[in-house]
Image (tube, helix red, strand yellow):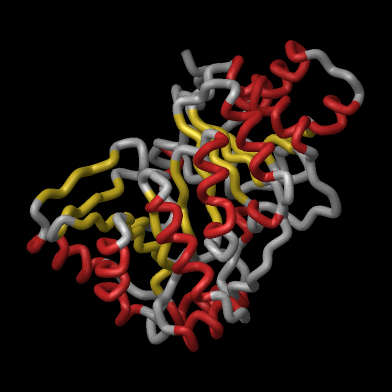
Amino acid sequence: MPVSDKFERPIISLRISITNRCNVKCFYCHHDGIIPQSYEMNSDEIFKAAKVAADIGVQKIRLSGGEPLIRDDIVEIVEKISSLNFKDISLTTNGTLLGNYAESLKAAGLTRVNVSFDTLNPETYKFITKRDYIENAKEGIQKASEVGLYPVKVNMVVMKGINHEEIWDMFQFCKENNAVLQLIELLKTDNCHDTEFFDEYHYEMEELEEELTKIADNVKTRQFMQDRKKYFVDEGEIEVVKPMDNTQFCKNCTRLRITPDGKIKPCLLRNDNLVDLLEPMRNGYSDEELKELFLNAIENRKPFYDDKC
């Protein structure tokens, strides 16, 4: 049974950011709430963290970055974690290296993959990422689907005036490759520069969701994912992912995170309550002692937006 925090939220999943490094430079990237680091956990340390997480009832692991496929030991990492018999092992990637790794990752035990891919237009892709890797990313999505990673989800950050007119083209591309399209709404932060960026590029999803509701063959609500809606349209799937700065996100949060330098991060939106796991591991702490660090982090979890939680 998963351990629950004081707000009766079970800790079902663990997201391990295995690197801060990335081979593209998307101008909207928030690095998943992690701060720059100068070093990373090695594969044995990542395995140890996952093993202790399994001992407290975590059922799902997601590997992320940065770009996790930059690590030359990525297949080894997945293989080791897979030996722990998690219900689900997933990975978030920009897809540019996925064509090289999809088959071996599947064989190592990876269950599914999310690919950050915002446009089918080469010039727009280059504008967003500052790189010319669009064909590599498309190949990665296609290869992931071919080898049986399921589901393949394509994360499209929708930006007004940049790619918002491509939504239906992207949906068709996803259908052709047996992928689910996830439309990500821009997140507004307290940073002044980010506020200006948000005001310029934020695309309001309400009108689109109204259209999807009308044309969908079926609509499902994902209760533990902010009541996120999944629309089934013409034998394809679209999900709309709203910003996480809301009480619904906090109320249904069942995830812990670990930063690349081995700190347990109980809340995506906070960096003032991190619990160091790496130094204790390197100092020879037993699994039971490491388990206590996890439990302390869980005990101190509090909804960031808690006025209605």
Report the residue at 67% width, 67% height from top: 23
Q: Is residue 234 left or right of residue 72?
A: left
Instruction: State how many labels appear.
Output: 0
Q: In this view, does 24 lie to the left or right of 142?
A: right
Report the residue at 65% width, 29% height from top: 80
Front in this rendered view, residue 301 or 38: 38
The picture quadrant where one finds residue 204 is bottom left
| Image quadrant where one finds the C terminus | top left
Front in this rendered view, residue 278 or 82: 82
The picture quadrant where one finds residue 300 is top right
Q: Where is residue 102 in the image (x, y as percent from the top left)?
A: 52, 50
Report the residue at 68% width, 37% height from top: 76
Front in this rendered view, residue 275 or 175: 175
Q: Position of residue 49 (x, y in %)?
A: 70, 28
Report the residue at 57% width, 75% height from top: 133
The answer, for residue 179, to whether it is visible in the render is yes
Front in this rendered view, residue 147 or 234: 147
The answer, for residue 5, to whether it is visible in the render is no
Is 51 placed above or below 260 here?
Answer: above
Q: Position of residue 112 (x, y in %)?
A: 44, 43
